[in-house]
Image (cartoon, helix red, strand yellow):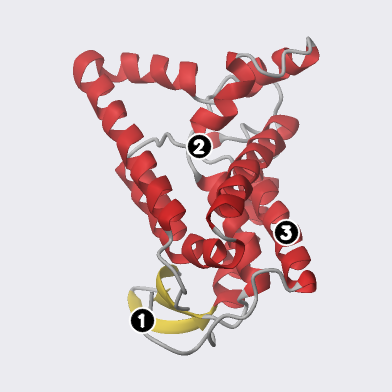
Amino acid sequence: MIPLRDRNPTRRVPVVTLALVAACVGAFLVELSVTGSGGDVALEAFFERWGAVPADITAALNRGDYFGPATLSVLTSMFLHGGWLHLLGNMLFLWIFGNNVEDRLGPIPFLLFYLVGGITAALAQVVIDPGSTVPLVGASGAIAAALGAYIVLFPGARILSLVFLGFFYQLLEVPALVVLGYWFVLQLASGFGALGAETAQGGVAFFAHIGGFALGVVVGVILRASGYGAGRRGLDAGPMG
């Protein structure tokens, strides 16, 4: 099930979501430049420097170094991606779901929420595999936080999705609760299935997704209970966006 767009209009231009997409694309262009000048070896060194390496973060936290290069890499890592598919998939999810969460929170609160979500996600993976030397890269954890908030705030929003049925596929409008619930169940199954092996195998840090999503759900519940940012148009009205 691949979401393509949602029937959930926003009240304002999602400037932060657009800026985050632009930042990730810009960082990826830098990666392409690094690869072009130095090959895969140079890119690996780039990821080791700017990606979040759990073993380095664990060592830094143990010695009380909370603002050194290792810990600050948690921030830089969420703008890097391991390839075109990684980038495009993340940006698709960010655009579909992030713009509505930004609309509810407001630009600056959403930016803070996104960054805290990414930090929480990375630390969740560090807790699960503190000795890993595989750099964590990608916006997935921060985006997972947006997904968690979205499923609480807009559970009935219709998501146009590409649904695969064996060798066949169909375009269907599916409630966000189903689309994002299915996504989260996959993360749980994959994450716990990877325990005892390399938890970031295949470049996917499942517990970062789980940690980010859990934070988003908590924030979504608080927003829904408090009514913060409410007073928007009906979820099923207007064009898809």
Q: Is residue 238 left or right of residue 200?
A: left
Q: Is residue 115 left or right of residue 25?
A: right
Q: Nearer the viewer, residue 162 or 68?
A: 68
Residue 130, given in percent of the width and then of the height, sits at 71, 24
Q: Nearer the viewer, residue 192 or 228?
A: 228
**Label 2 to label 3: alpha-carbon separation:** 20 Å
**Is any atom of residue 193 visible in this view?**
no
| Count of numbered circles on the image | 3
In the picture of the structure, the residue carrying the numbered disc 1 is 171
Give the secondary structure at mark 2. Answer: loop
Q: Within 10 Å of the Cα at label 1, are there few (<14), some (14-19), or many (20+) other Cα atoms?
A: some
Residue 123, given in percent of the width and then of the height, sits at 69, 34
Q: Residue at x 67, y 57 (%)?
A: 216
* Three-letter amino acid code at the position of disc 3: Val
Q: Within 10 Å of the Cα at label 2, are there few (<14), some (14-19), or many (20+) other Cα atoms?
A: many
**Label 1 to label 3: alpha-carbon separation:** 31 Å
Residue 139, given in percent of the width and then of the height, sits at 49, 43
